[in-house]
Image: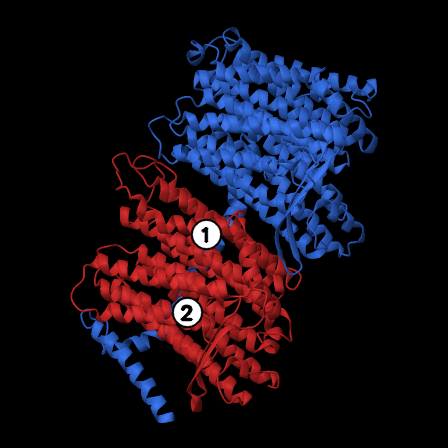
């Protein structure tokens, strides 16, 4: 590496290692070797390391702003025609994403200090978050598909461990399992794509792959399978239909991890898709699939969110829905808009989850029907919720409004139906947010919300800081995307957005929340509620299809093994066993004699042979 | 120099067996470990003298023996056998260190392990078909005894089953070797003297069939695998470590060295079918593993699945896939050894391996948190999560085989996905969940975990820095993949 590069660039390879360093430093506490101090030193060290990562990212950003993008590449493995490199692309976009990851991770970790205050396994939590953050930091900077896959899998592993953090609870165990297996399905499909690309193209860096695409000679079937395999990974990571189940269940994990999962982890998945976009040109079908699944998730997720009684689940479905919109934008070749959507959504959703985390920490309750009246006693949390909700939907003038505006305008030009999907998803999400807001913050206080003081400073500080940041997102977005200008969409689009938002607010604000209605006595209505509450019975469908298939095959294999394969063997063996029974060689005590005899006879045999043959 | 790898363990076994007096069991264990440590150091010495960039056999040693029989004592080492020799040294040492101090008849036990270690080294180094066969058979008897004496309740049956299967395997291999030598008209059984180029395809196929089935029993591949779960279930922990980590590799080694190496023409003809067989074996092993309730049986069936990748890689026979086969052998050796150690630790403390009974072992205060954490690493490595050796092995195998056999490779990748299913069941059932309120499991002292920790470090090291192993084997695997340069 040339020594004239700024120090921050020379040391850029450290960025993903910061998180891992945090893991290493937490181990003595996480493993229980140091007990005297309690687990907090591990937490402080992780926060510090993340801060260093954030500052290093800032220095890099400055260097890149002055000198332009850099690329660093380290040889990792080479054999025959296979060459694998760990390469990082220090472009402005990637570094902005890195700052987003490191910044939100920092805030979430400070938040976790307060949220998990009395948690025994605090050190383990922070070690896992360090692992999580390291993998994400690597993913956003990676410029090689191999490295991206490598880190995405680490992300899957750390998600499993974070969701399973409270592994003593049965629901957590199933949630961790589902999170891992759903993502793993996506990952294995993605691995098929990665392996195929590596074999066909022979290169793994994104830039090289883009150059390969125009001259690729693949049969249409191979190209389409490749495209579908490649999108499967991001579909799983971003909890898109039909692999959306895990995100909702993952809400059983600790809230600070949910903050990251709903903001930056899904963003990482979408960024990977964004990088794959030029390769997907090979397979038009995969783009169509993206649009269909994205639209289904956007509408379906928003609808399912409406029927959830768990406060975290009510929000997590909207994350899937928002990612659906991003997928549509990517499939429609609008990378800049997709990035804006991702950024605006990530900060606002993180804030929403902090606010919800505060509610849960204070009331020890996450059931919407048992909450109420918190607005009067938790002002910072209430403001955070309002700002987060406004920021993650098209409510002027916060971030998503501008991103949605550009999005709707672009969609209206290519296919108006997709513009309608965006508007409809926006309306439904706002109905949901207003409903949740009314349930939690308005109305009379209930048993669990009677004594609900505002949260402690470790939680309040990141929450308030992020509130300010969300309020400032439009300004940041102007800096990120000066061309064609944030407000370049026509007034009709703006009005359409305002109308969709207002409809959502009015419907959500007026729909009766009478408790008796939480499960209606009218059969059709109840069926609709159940359909949405159980997420279109996706879990049941899975259990009856994929799970049942694998289980049946497994039973069949085990039966075949026992009865047919082993049965034949036993039949054959029973003959020789019968003849061997007379010998009774396995009676204990004669063993050593037997060994000696056997060994001696071998020696004698060989010796005599060599003597005779001489 | 290579003879040292045989002499050290074999002499050690002899001395340990006939040493006068009645030394304390712990002293015998230490002596055994010392011999194996010396053997490991010796194999590291071989590693240092080995030139990875040179092709062909290195450090050859040759002593005429039974000239009229065509049996010569000839040893040599290349990039295929060197890593296996190293892992044999390491895992035998791990097995001895993981043996309980108060084991029954320690003198016999440790002598037999040393005997196995020497025999396995001999098989990996032998450059003469008959010599290989002798060592291959030599390792059977000690292993049979290790299962039959120190096994569980059904040990007699499992040991007999093992012996019958491997006797058939040995018979087929011997028949194949004899047939090959006779058919080629070679004067001796030297590996380098035999060339099947002039043989008719029918003869080649018949010989390949015999050798294939012989080695498939040892590997084991579906449908010749039923001895393995029984043997593992009844064997004690150190024996399982040896069996899975080292002895199964004799089968895959034979597959690469003799089936593919000596009969390349017939091999190429059968390759698509072999790849299909690999896919069936992988899927069958993985699916059967899902149904298992005994943790040891589950790990045993996972071996059936994971060894299938080696057959796939050998069938594809590209430089990358063959390198992947080497990685897979080493990686599977380390990972399955680790998993058996951990299952053994759980069994020792709880008295059970049944997934229907075990719960909440990860409990930090009253459970086995370190065993649980290492188990999570082990199963994730087995499932092919990057950063650990399993991923690199699978990636190389799949990358090398995809173009040659796309559908078979994709099916094997599905099997790789299924690994996550059954091992997640294992972790979720046995380690997650709530430990019974009154259960207080005996803590395992840290030094008892050292073998498992060392294996974990090795798994991570290969996963993060695979280039070392790659360099060691690349020349050999590339040479093997070239049609004309097979193993010459």
Q: Please give the letter of the chain rendered in red.
A: B
Residue located at (49% from left, 69% from top): B253
Rendering coords of residue A568 (x, y %) = 40, 71
Could you say whether the residue bearing mark 1 is in a helix, strand or loop?
Answer: helix
Q: Quadrant of residue B243?
A: bottom left
In-image side of A396 versus B71 (left or right):
right
Residue matched to label 2: B121
What hue does chain A carry in this figure?
A: blue
Could you say whether the residue bearing mark 2 is in a helix, strand or loop?
Answer: helix
Q: Residue furthest top?
A: A376
In the picture shown, does residue B89 fall above or below A303?
below
Please tell me which residue lies in front, B319 or A48: A48
The quadrant of the rendering that contains the N terminus of chain B is bottom left
In the picture shown, does residue B157 fall above or below A124?
below
Q: Residue furthest front?
A: A3
Q: Earlier in the sequence, mark 2 or mark 1?
A: 2
Rendering coords of residue A18 (x, y %) = 55, 34
Residue matched to label 1: B458
Please tell me which residue lies in front, A73 or B237: A73
């Amino acid at each position: 590496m040339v020594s004239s590069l700024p120090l921050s660039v020379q040391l850029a390879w450290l960025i993903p290692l910061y998180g891992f360093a945090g893991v290493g430093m937490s181990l003595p506490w996480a493993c229980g070797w140091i007990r005297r101090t309690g687990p907090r030193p591990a937490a402080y060290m992780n926060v510090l390391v993340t801060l260093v990562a954030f500052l290093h990212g800032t220095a890099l950003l400055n260097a890149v702003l002055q000198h332009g993008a850099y690329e660093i590449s380290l040889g990792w493995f080479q054999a025959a025609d296979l060459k694998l490199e760990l390469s990082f692309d220090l472009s402005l976009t990637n570094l902005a994403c890195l700052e987003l990851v490191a910044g939100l991770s920092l805030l979430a970790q400070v938040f976790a200090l307060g949220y998990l205050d009395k948690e025994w396994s605090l050190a383990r939590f922070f070690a896992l978050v360090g692992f999580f953050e390291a993998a994400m930091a690597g993913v956003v900077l990676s410029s090689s598909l191999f490295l991206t896959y490598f880190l995405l899998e680490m992300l899957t592993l750390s998600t499993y461990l974070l969701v399973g953090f409270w592994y003593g609870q049965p629901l957590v165990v199933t949630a961790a399992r589902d999170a891992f297996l759903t993502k793993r399905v996506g990952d294995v499909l993605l691995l098929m794509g990665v392996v195929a690309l590596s074999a066909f193209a022979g290169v793994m860096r994104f830039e090289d792959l883009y150059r390969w695409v125009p001259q690729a000679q693949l049969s249409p079937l191979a190209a389409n399978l490749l495209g579908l395999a490649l999108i499967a990974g991001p579909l799983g990571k971003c909890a898109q239909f039909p692999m959306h189940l895990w995100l909702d269940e993952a809400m059983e994990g600790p809230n600070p991890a949910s903050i990251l999962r709903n903001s930056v982890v899904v963003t990482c998945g979408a960024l990977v898709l964004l990088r794959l976009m030029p390769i997907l040109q090979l397979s038009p079908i995969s783009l169509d699939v993206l649009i269909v699944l994205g639209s289904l998730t956007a509408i379906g997720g928003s609808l399912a969110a409406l029927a959830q009684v768990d406060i975290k689940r009510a929000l997590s479905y909207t994350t899937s829905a928002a990612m659906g919109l991003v997928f549509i934008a990517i499939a429609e070749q609008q990378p800049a808009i997709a990035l804006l959507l991702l950024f605006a959504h990530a900060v606002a959703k993180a804030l929403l989850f902090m606010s919800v985390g505060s509610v849960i920490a204070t009331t020890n309750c996450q059931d919407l029907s048992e909450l109420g009246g918190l607005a009067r006693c938790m002002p910072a949390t209430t403001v955070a919720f309002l700002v987060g909700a406004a920021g993650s939907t098209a409510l002027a003038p916060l971030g998503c409004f501008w991103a949605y505006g550009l999005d709707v305008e672009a969609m209206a030009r290519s296919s108006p139906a997709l513009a309608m999907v965006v508007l409809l998803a926006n309306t439904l999400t706002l109905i949901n947010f207003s409903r949740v807001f009314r349930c939690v913050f308005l109305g009379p206080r209930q048993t669990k919300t009677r004594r609900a003081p505002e949260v402690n400073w470790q939680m309040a500080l990141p929450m308030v800081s992020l509130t300010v940041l969300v309020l400032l997102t439009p300004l940041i977005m102007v800096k990120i995307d000066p061309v064609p200008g944030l407000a370049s969409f026509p007034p009709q689009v703006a009005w359409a957005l305002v109308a969709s938002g207002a409809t959502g607010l009015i419907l959500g604000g007026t729909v009766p929340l009478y408790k008796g209605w939480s499960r209606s006595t009218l059969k059709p209505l109840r069926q609709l509620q159940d359909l949405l509450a159980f997420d279109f019975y996706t879990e049941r469908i899975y259990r009856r299809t994929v799970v049942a298939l694998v289980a049946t095959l497994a039973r069949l294999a085990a039966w075949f093994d026992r009865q047919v394969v082993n049965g034949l063997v036993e039949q054959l063996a029973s003959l020789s066993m019968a003849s061997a029974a007379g010998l009774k060689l396995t009676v204990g005590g004669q063993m050593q004699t037997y060994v000696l005899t056997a060994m001696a006879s071998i020696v004698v045999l060989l010796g005599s042979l060599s003597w005779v043959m001489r | 120099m290579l003879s040292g790898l045989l002499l050290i363990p074999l002499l050690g076994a002899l001395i340990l067996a006939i040493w006068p007096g009645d030394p304390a069991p712990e002293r015998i264990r230490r002596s055994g470990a010392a011999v194996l440590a010396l053997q490991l150091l010796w194999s590291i010495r071989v590693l240092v003298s080995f030139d990875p960039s040179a092709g062909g056999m290195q450090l050859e040693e040759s002593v005429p023996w039974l000239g009229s029989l065509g049996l010569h004592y000839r040893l040599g080492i290349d990039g295929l056998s060197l890593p296996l020799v190293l892992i044999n040294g390491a895992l035998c040492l791990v097995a001895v260190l993981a043996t309980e101090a108060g084991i029954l008849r320690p003198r016999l036990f440790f002598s037999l392990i040393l005997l196995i270690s020497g025999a396995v080294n001999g098989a990996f180094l032998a450059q003469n078909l008959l010599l290989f066969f002798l060592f291959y058979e030599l390792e059977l008897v000690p292993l049979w005894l290790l299962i039959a004496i120190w096994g569980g309740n059904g040990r007699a049956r499992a040991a007999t089953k093992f012996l019958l299967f491997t006797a058939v395997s040995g018979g087929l291999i011997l028949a194949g070797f004899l047939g090959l030598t006779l058919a080629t008209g070679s004067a001796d059984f030297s590996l380098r003297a035999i060339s099947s180029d002039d043989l008719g395809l029918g003869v080649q196929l018949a010989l390949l069939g015999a050798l294939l089935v012989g080695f498939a029993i040892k590997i084991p591949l579906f449908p010749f695998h039923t001895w393995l779960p029984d043997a593992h279930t009844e064997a004690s922990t150190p024996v399982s470590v040896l069996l899975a980590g080292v002895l199964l590799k004799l089968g895959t080694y034979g597959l690469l060295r003799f089936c593919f190496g000596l009969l390349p023409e017939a091999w190429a003809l059968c390759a698509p079918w072999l790849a299909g067989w690999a896919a069936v074996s992988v899927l069958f092993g993985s699916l059967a593993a899902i149904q298992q309730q005994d943790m040891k049986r589950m790990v045993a069936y996972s071996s059936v699945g994971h060894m299938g990748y080696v057959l796939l890689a050998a069938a594809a026979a590209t430089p990358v896939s063959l390198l992947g086969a080497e990685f897979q052998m080493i990686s599977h050796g380390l990972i399955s050894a680790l998993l058996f150690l951990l299952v053994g630790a759980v069994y020792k403390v709880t008295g059970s391996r049944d997934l229907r009974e075990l719960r909440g072992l990860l409990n930090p205060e009253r459970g086995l948190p370190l065993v649980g954490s290492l188990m999570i690493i082990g199963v994730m490595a087995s499932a092919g999560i990057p950063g650990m050796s399993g991923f690199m092995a699978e990636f190389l195998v799949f990358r090398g085989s995809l173009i040659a056999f796309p559908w078979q490779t994709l099916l094997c990748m599905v099997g790789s996905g299924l690994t996550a299913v059954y091992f997640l069941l294992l972790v979720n059932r046995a380690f997650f969940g709530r430990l019974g309120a009154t259960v207080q499991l005996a803590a395992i002292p840290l030094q008892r975990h050292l073998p498992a920790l060392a294996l974990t470090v090795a798994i991570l090291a290969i996963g993060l820095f695979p280039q070392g192993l790659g360099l060691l084997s690349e020349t050999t695997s590339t040479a093997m993949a070239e049609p004309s340069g097979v193993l010459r």
